[in-house]
Amino acid sequence: MTWNSTMSSGYSSLEEDSEEYFFTARTSFFKKNPGKATEGKDVEKELRREFSTEEIRQKVEAYNSMTKDHLKMTLGSHGEYTGFIKVLMDLRRPVTEAFYLPQEVNMILHISSNHTARQVVGALLGKFKVVDNPAKYALYKRCRREEQVYVCKLAEAECPLYLRLLAGPDQDSLSLVLREQQTGEVMWDAFSIPELRNFLLILDKEEQEQKDALIRRYTLYRNRLEEAIRQHRV
């Protein structure tokens, strides 16, 4: 598994002012286990069946003819294929006690059709030396259809490159995002003591910022009222 990262600051494009570095993890090919999509009837039908080598070849050729960024797929001799996926790192918590991942970081990974979502998550966390429990994170797919955006968590056994092949290279049709698990309730027992203490520091900082903003707001109101009173007395 090979990958590079593209970082962006402010509101500029993720492709601008980027730094790139590469990582290779030695992995082997496993028997293909196509995932199940939950959005889009056409995709669902395709995910319920196996493709022949000829069908895969046709899809890879069609994909390569549409891509505009030279991140093409390569077909192997036994129906497996390799290619690139782009993953947006959307982590809210600090990666370590002292390091926050910059916002809008795109990681470009070179993977095989047999790599699973679980393996991709592990590779991404490994890059930043996150010693956290990988079960706290998940890979999500984001799709745009008719001005609506849908987000769905991938099952651990789903193969992201397979989804990329079916969706085509258009990021609006399918984009991948790494996020903390969204279970609806925080599992505090899964965090270490240093992590919990760091969360308290973050809460204290946010609380103080809210207090300062509120004080500035009411100070401004008070000054305006006092000025209005002085004008009435004149």
Image (cartoon, rainbow, N blue to C red):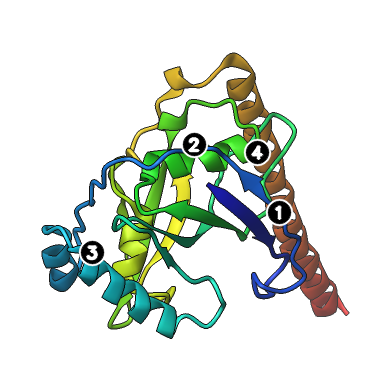
Relative image position of residue 99 (x, y in whole percent): 72, 38
Decide which of tag 4 and tag 3 comes sooner along the chain.
3
Q: Nearer the viewer, mark 4 or mark 1?
A: 4
Position of 227 relative to 48 (above/below): below
Q: Residue at x 65, y 57 (%)?
A: 5
Tell whether label 4 touches label 2 (CB within 8 Å).
no
- Tell me the SS state at disc 2: helix
Q: CA distance from mark 4 to mark 3?
A: 37 Å
Relative image position of residue 171 (x, y in whole percent): 44, 73
- Tell me the SS state at disc 3: helix
Relative image position of residue 174 (x, y in whole percent): 37, 68
Q: CA distance from mark 1 to mark 3?
A: 62 Å
Question: Which labelled disc corresponds to residue 213?
Answer: 1
Disc 4 residue crowd, few under 14, some 14–19, many 20+, Cα 10 Å: few
Tell whether label 2 touches label 1 (CB within 8 Å).
no
Residue bearing mark 4: 128
Residue bearing mark 2: 122
Describe residue 89's horizontal placement relative to residue 19 as left or right: left
User: The residue under label 1 is which amino acid type?
Assistant: Ala
Residue bearing mark 3: 53
Comparing 27 with 223, the one in front is 27
